[in-house]
Image (tube, rainbow, N blue to C red):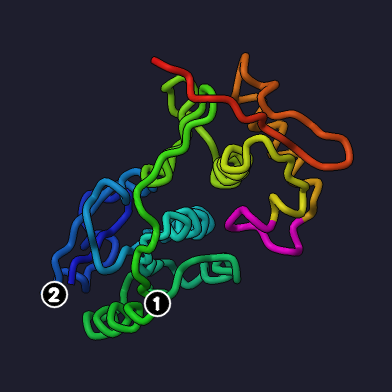
Amino acid sequence: MDVLVLTTARRGRDVLPGLELLPHRVATRRPSVHEYLTSGPCDAVMVDGRTHPHAACELSRRLAATSRGVPVIGVIEEQGAPYVDEDCAIVQLLLPQASPAEIDARLRLAQRHRVPDARPSSTLEVGPFTVDTDAYVIRLDGIPLRLTHHQYELLRALLKHAGRPLSRSALIAGCPGWTDATNPRAVDCHVRAVRAKLGPHRDSIRTVRGHGYLIPWSPPVQA
């Protein structure tokens, strides 16, 4: 089995010592969606949440949003377990001191959650924006925007439906990580944050009174 460990540690065995005693092939990369997408295929991905369990859960949601279908296993200290909520995309939990037998069992159980990658590689271009869904990045005038998970999903939804206003409820429903319990005003906060990162293009996101938010459709900018 090919296992990818996302961690700031130098080696996967620093995160989960028992992993070294198993015959699985283990690769270690930095904890980011970009590193995950460029690391090649794997059967399971382990997220190091020993010191920052909340960040590990957020990363798991972003990994799941790539639609690769690879199960995410969290390595979390016992006191960090409360951070694993219903919105977390972690399907199995391991304590750092887990035995090789338990690690192997968790890896096998995690495979039940594996689904085929049904989404083809694609990019979407609207005006100066380019959405690269495989790299999980949105570029503005060719420069990657530094966006949080929610900001990326919101801007991606608006660009995907460019030319059509989306209500707050439609944006909540279309953005992974948000639920029916999400306060609609949270959308307004994220829109303000995204606008602030667009610089001179901040007016690309328009407010349509009574209907929500809109990015007008325009042809891709030719280089």
* Location of residue 142 in the rendering, given as x and y in whole percent from the top left corner: 42, 22
- The residue at 29%/77% (across/down) is 107
Q: Residues within 10 Å of mark 1 (few under 14, many from 20)?
A: few
Q: Badge 1 is on which residue?
A: 113
* Location of residue 36 in the rendering, given as x and y in whole percent from the top left corner: 32, 51
> As drawn, is 13 to the left or to the right of 15?
left
- The residue at 46%/37% (across/down) is 124
Q: Residue furthest right?
A: 210
- Image quarter of the N terminus: bottom left
Q: Quadrant of residue 49?
A: bottom left
Question: Where 70 sits versus 51, above or below?
Answer: below
* Foreground: disc 2 or disc 1: 1
Q: Are the residues flagged by discs 2 and 1 in contact, CB closer than 8 Å? A: no
> As drawn, is 111 to the left or to the right of 151?
left
Question: Where 173 sits versus 92, above or below?
Answer: above
Range drawn in magenta:
173-182
- The residue at 36%/49% (across/down) is 31
* Location of residue 132 in the rendering, given as x and y in whole percent from the top left corner: 41, 39
Mark linked to residue 200:
none
Examine the structure image and report whether residue 4 is included in the region drawn in magenta: no
Question: Where 68 sits versus 138, above or below?
Answer: below
Q: Badge 2 is on which residue?
A: 21
* Location of residue 117 in the rendering, given as x and y in whole percent from the top left corner: 35, 63
